Amino acid sequence: MSTKPKAYLVGGGIGSLAAAAFMIRDGGMPGENISILEAMPVLGGSLDGAEVQPGSCRRFARPADGPCR
C-alpha cells in the first residue's frame, strides 16, 4: 500500500486549479499526485476562455448579473 498523499479535485474550475497550485507550492505535494476530474474537454470552468454564444455577454452568466448591455 502506498503512503504517498494523493488528492482528487472534482471540477476543473479556478477553485480546483488554485487548490492544486497551493498544494504543490505550500504543501510540497508532487504534481503527479494530484488529479483534477473534469467532464468538459478543457479546464477553467466558466473562465475557460471559450467564445460566448450569440446573445450572451459571457459563458455561464448568472441571473443575478442582470441582462446583457
Image (tube, rainbow, N blue to C red):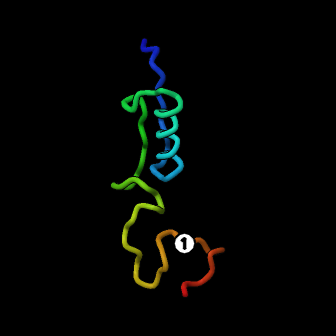
Q: Is 8 drawn above or below residue 51 in the view shown? A: above
Q: Residue 31 in the image: x percent, y percent?
A: 39, 32
Residue at (51% x, 45% y) in the render: 18
Residue at (48% x, 48% y) in the render: 11
Q: Which residue is mark 1?
A: 61
Instruction: Name the image quarter holding the C terminus.
Output: bottom right
- Taking the view exactly as shown, the residue that stands out farthest to the top is 1
Instruction: Name the image quarter holding the N terminus.
Output: top left
Q: Residue 25 in the image: x percent, y percent?
A: 48, 34
Number of marks drawn:
1
Quadrant for residue 63, please give it: bottom right
The local secondary structure at tag 1 comes to: loop
Residue at (38% x, 55% y) in the render: 40
Give amino acid for label 1.
Ala
Q: Is 2 drawn above or below residue 57 in the view shown? A: above
- Taking the view exactly as shown, the residue that stands out farthest to the right is 64
Q: Is 46 drawn above or below residue 4 in the view shown? A: below
